[in-house]
């Protein structure tokens, strides 16, 4: 394997216990989005989605949609809903 092949393999979702959702070019400050990410990070997926329903931030509905997308992916892979939690959640510029 070449170095490029090894690097690109890390970004694929072939891992059986990982579901991921991403969004690029969202018109919102990364500093403001960090507050929304803090609400979800480390929490069970259902709790995180319910918390984002009541947050009065522009990024909350977007983050809720991303979490629901990741939840659908995880359920399609056969993972148990009650064992799912948000492991990573971050926002960067761009």
Image (cartoon, grey):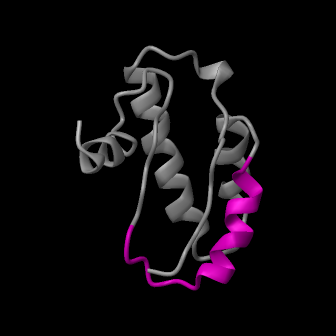
Left or right of residue 10, residue 67 in this image = right
**Which x, y percent locates residue 65?**
47, 53
**Which x, y percent locates residue 36?**
69, 66
Residue 61: image quadrant is: bottom right
Looking at the image, residue 31 lies above or below residue 48: below
Q: Is residue 68 magenta?
A: no
**Which x, y percent locates residue 45?**
65, 37
Q: Residue at x 67, y 80 (%)?
A: 32
Looking at the image, residue 80 lies above or below residue 39: above
Q: Residue at x 76, y 41 (%)?
A: 43
Q: Which of the image's four quarters has the N terminus?
A: top left
Q: How many marks?
A: 0
Residue 77: image quadrant is: top left
Left or right of residue 19, residue 48 in this image = right
Looking at the image, residue 14 lies above or below residue 40: above
Given residues 62 and 31, the one toward you in this image is: 31
**Which x, y percent locates residue 11?**
37, 45
Given residues 50 and 4, the one toward you in this image is: 4
Q: Residue at x 74, y 70 (%)?
A: 35
Residue 46: image quadrant is: top right
State the predominant SS element of the stretch in magenta.
helix
Q: Which of the image's four quarters has the C terminus?
A: bottom left
Q: Residue at x 45, y 23 (%)?
A: 75
Q: Which residues, given as a range, are shown in magenta?
A: 24-41
Left or right of residue 32, residue 2 in this image = left
């Amino acid at each position: 394997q070449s170095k490029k092949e090894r690097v690109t393999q890390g970004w694929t979702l072939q891992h059986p216990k990982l579901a991921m959702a991403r969004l690029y070019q969202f018109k919102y400050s990364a500093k403001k989005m960090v507050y929304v990410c803090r609400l979800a990070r480390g929490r069970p997926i259902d709790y995180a989605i319910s918390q984002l329903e009541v947050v009065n931030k522009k990024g909350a509905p977007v983050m809720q949609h991303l979490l629901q997308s990741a939840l659908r992916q995880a359920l399609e892979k056969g993972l148990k809903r009650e064992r799912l939690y948000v492991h990573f959640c971050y926002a960067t510029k761009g």
